[in-house]
Amino acid sequence: MEILKKRIIKDGLAVGTEILKVDSFLNHQVDVTLFELIGAEFRTRFDDVADKVDKILTIEASGIAVAAFTAKYFGSVPVVFAKKEQPSTMAEDYYFSEVMSFTKRKLSSIRIGKKFLAAGERCLIIDDFLAHGQAALGLARIAQQAGAEVLGAGIVIEKEFQEGGARLREKGYRVESLAVVSKIEDGAIYFKE
Ligand code: 5GP
């Protein structure tokens, strides 16, 4: 997605060789005009399965806005986001999955309330970044626990030099990434052709 790549080059900040900071339009401040285009692009990429999508799954916090804009292009299906914090009450029943946070370098348990994901539901996973695949694989494991089907994963920025994309594809998941970063070096960001 050319407009996204141009925005990453213009406003993205390379941190070392592994982290890309895009706080000005994706992770802290949200550019809603760009998010509309991102939602429309995911619809184009997943057009063949669009009428099958029952729900969009994502993970708090940055995935939520992307998923919400995307949902508009899939018939405004519900967006369910996995929570990272301990629930204040255990009254509700949850599906859990252990996930190692790449940016925070800590193991956390993500959860989705059982009443928001049912057996047979077909889901699209949407997230802002794909690095080592922990978040997306955690969501896929939760879908599996629920007996729901994952139709694919839509990612805004995939860092190809980390193994998440390969791991997901190896497991048979369809991954559509709007910008694929092949390398971060000396402050420069390189994209896969
Ligand atoms: P993964 O679980 O694939 O290792 O990492 C994906 C998650 O970590 C995303 O949900 C995202 O929040 C965060 N993340 C991974 N790499 C980056 C990065 O380079 N920049 C930012 N802003 N977030 C990242």
Image (spheres, grey):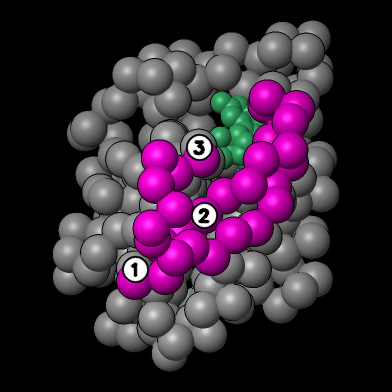
Q: Please tell me which of labels 1 and 2 falls first in the chain.
A: 2
Name the foreground residue: 4 vs 116. 116
Whether 107 is among the magenta residues is yes
Q: From mark 3 to mark 1, how far is it between C-alphas?
A: 17 Å
Residue to which mark 3 is pinned:
85
Name the foreground residue: 24 vs 146. 146
Name the residue at 66% across, 14% down. 14
Residue type, mark 1 in image: Phe
Residue to which mark 2 is pinned:
111
Name the residue at 63% across, 22% down. 20
Residue type, mark 3 in image: Glu
Mark 3 falls on what kind of element? Answer: loop
User: Residue reaching furthest bottom?
Assistant: 120
Residue to which mark 1 is pinned:
116
Give the magenta-colored segment's residue range: 86-115
Pinpoint residue 1: horizontal percent, then vertical percent: 45, 45
Name the residue at 23% across, 44% down. 36
Mark 1 falls on what kind of element? Answer: helix
